[in-house]
Image (cartoon, coloured by chain):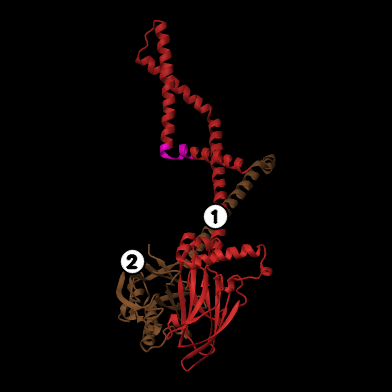
């Protein structure tokens, strides 16, 4: 009987130690979980930030000369892996060169109700003096059997390839019949980036790149 | 207070790193073992040398056997002393474990605080880059006999809720081009909220009318500042009219030449961008300035 009473009393120190240890362990695992969810959030935000900035460069160009009211330029087209697809060298009347891109809306996330990204097709070259309708169409230069080669060099699923080829064929058909390829009913719009005399001119002999952003903006920057 | 805390943390981390290195890393254990062996060797050497000197002084012989015996006795003595010091050594080990634990916990808390700071920075970056500002609205009133009649409403990015100015146009063609000067600032400027990409619409043309024959949008005042960026003194808060004018002129000088923009070092690109689409009567769309760079066109109903 005395023995049992002795065991019942025991030492309270051990109990406190176990409670303290349990709290310590619980705190450790809680903190670990907090740290891991924080790391996931940081990775998610970094990915969102880089996605916003993500870009493709389907065109690089260099003005070769500006003589007699003509601009002579070399235009190079590239696929998504940076491989050269076509080279065009031509002269156009005018002082300001316009590089026109066609932007097709696409839905990259299944849950998005509206298009959240854009695919860019090089469309045509014109100038301040040459109307867009009289400009040089670029579609033929990168047509690889119905698929736009500027979008090659990436892993597309058969369904994605078909959707891209269909959009490309539609744009080609409209442009060939003299209609605007920027079909607003499909959410398509054009963006002609260009130089502005007296403010920002393309220097002869300098290579510039046309940067197409996943958000839909087109930007011209020096290719350093 | 911060300096004292930093000094304490520095000392704590240094002690923790040293303990971790000495007791867990192979090199640390080797160094520790070598030091102990060296100390034991030195002790044995001292004892054996002392005994030899004492034997010589007493005129006794001190051979290899006597030296080995003295050394073995000393080793046994050292073993006994170490056994006696075991509670103290266990206490030291427990203190070291506590020290390393405290240092690791402090580091984890520091990392968590740094992570929270990073989350705040990235959230601001994504929020600012994902933002867009309306540059103009276009309402197509009529498309008949190969001519487009439209009404344009221009917005100031500081107050995108209401148009700053409107203009009606009539031009030949099927496709409308809205030409703007676009100034994209460095991502770091935008993500830090210090700058906003700008677009100033300046001309309108069509697929059939070239830019030189297009319609000028009379948006610049005699100082070369777009009217949409002007403000009456009553509208300015926390900034005098002169200071506002000076800031505005400084900003507009960036848009006058590419060299000025490059010289400022914060402008990523400066160029013209003519966004365009086919139009029909009743169409209504907006041109937006994307903070990642460039312009986009979206139906007014999309927003």
- As displayed, is residue B64 above or below residue A171? above
- The answer for which chain carries disc 2 is A
Pointer 1 indicates a residue of which chain? Answer: B
Helix, strand or loop at label 2? It is: loop
Please identify the residue farthest to the bottom as the structure is shown: B145
Q: Give the chain letter for brown.
A: A
* Circle 1 residues within 10 Å: few <14, some 14–19, many ≥20: some
- Left or right position of A180 against A146: right
Which image quarter is the C terminus of chain B in?
A: bottom right
In this rendering, would B121 be left or right of A4? Answer: left
The picture places residue B157, in percent across and down from the top left corner, at: 58, 71
**Residue B128 disc label:** none
Looking at the rendered structure, the secondary structure element under dot 1 is helix
Q: Position of residue A3 (x, y in %)?
A: 67, 40
* Foreground of the two, B1 or B64: B1
Instruction: Give the extent of the magenta segment.
Output: B20-27
Q: Nearer the viewer, residue B84 or B1?
A: B1
Labels 2, 1: front one: 2
Q: Colour of chain B?
A: red
A109 relative to B154 in the view: left or right? left
Residue B175 visible (yes or no)? yes
- Residue pointed to by mark 1: B115
Near mark 2 (Cα within 10 A), the count class, few <14, some 14-19 or many ≥20, is few
Q: Is residue B130 above or below residue B148?
A: above
Residue A26 vertical position relative to residue A114 in the rendered view, above or below: above
- Which residue is identified by label 2? A205
Q: Residue at x 48, y 71 (%)?
A: B294
């Amino acid at each position: 009987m005395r023995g049992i009473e002795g065991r019942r009393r025991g030492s309270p120190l051990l109990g406190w130690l176990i409670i303290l240890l349990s709290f310590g362990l619980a705190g450790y695992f809680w903190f670990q979980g907090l740290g891991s969810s924080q790391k996931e959030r940081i990775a998610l935000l970094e990915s969102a930030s880089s996605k916003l900035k993500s870009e493709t460069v389907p065109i690089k160009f260099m003005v070769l000369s500006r003589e007699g009211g003509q601009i002579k330029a070399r235009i190079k087209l590239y696929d998504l892996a940076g491989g050269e697809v076509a080279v065009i060298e031509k002269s156009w009347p005018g002082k300001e060169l316009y590089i026109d891109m066609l932007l097709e809306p696409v839905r990259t996330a299944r849950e998005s109700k509206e298009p959240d990204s854009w695919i860019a097709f090089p469309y045509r070259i014109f100038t301040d003096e040459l109307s867009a309708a009289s400009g040089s169409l670029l579609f033929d230069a990168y047509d690889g059997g119905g698929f736009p080669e500027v979008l090659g060099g990436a892993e597309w699923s058969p369904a994605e390839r078909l959707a891209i080829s269909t959009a490309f064929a539609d744009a080609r058909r409209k442009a060939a019949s003299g209609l605007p390829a920027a079909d607003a009913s499909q959410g398509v719009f054009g963006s002609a980036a260009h130089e502005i005399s007296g403010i920002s001119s393309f220097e002869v002999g300098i290579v510039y790149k046309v940067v197409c952003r996943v958000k839909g903006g087109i930007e011209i920057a020096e290719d350093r | 207070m911060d300096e004292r805390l930093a000094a304490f943390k520095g000392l704590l981390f240094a002690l923790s790193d040293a303990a971790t290195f000495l007791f867990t890393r192979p090199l640390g254990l080797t160094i520790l073992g070598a030091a102990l062996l060296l100390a034991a060797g030195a002790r044995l050497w001292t004892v054996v040398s002392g005994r030899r000197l004492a034997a010589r002084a007493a005129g006794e012989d001190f051979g290899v056997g006597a030296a080995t015996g003295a050394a073995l006795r000393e080793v046994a003595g050292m073993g006994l002393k170490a056994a006696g010091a075991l509670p103290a050594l266990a206490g030291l080990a427990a203190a070291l474990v506590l020290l390393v634990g405290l240092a690791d916990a402090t580091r984890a808390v520091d990392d968590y605080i740094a992570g929270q700071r990073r989350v705040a920075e990235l959230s601001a970056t994504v929020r600012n880059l994902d933002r867009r500002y309306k540059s103009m609205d276009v309402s197509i009133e009529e498309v008949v006999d190969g001519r487009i009649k439209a009404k344009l409403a221009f917005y100031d990015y500081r107050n995108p809720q209401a148009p700053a100015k409107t203009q009606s146009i009539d031009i030949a063609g099927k496709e409308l081009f809205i030409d703007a000067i676009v100034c994209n600032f460095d991502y770091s400027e935008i993500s830090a909220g210090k700058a906003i990409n700008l677009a100033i619409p300046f001309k309108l043309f069509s697929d059939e009318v070239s830019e030189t024959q297009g319609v000028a949008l009379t948006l610049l005042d005699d100082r070369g500042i777009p009217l949409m960026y002007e403000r009456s003194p009553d509208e300015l808060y926390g900034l005098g009219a002169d200071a506002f004018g000076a800031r505005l002129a400084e900003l507009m000088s960036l848009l006058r030449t590419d060299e000025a923009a490059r010289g400022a070092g914060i402008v990523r690109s400066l160029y013209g961008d003519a966004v365009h689409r086919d139009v029909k009567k009743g169409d209504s769309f907006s041109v937006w300035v994307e903070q990642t760079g460039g312009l986009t066109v979206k139906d007014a109903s999309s927003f």
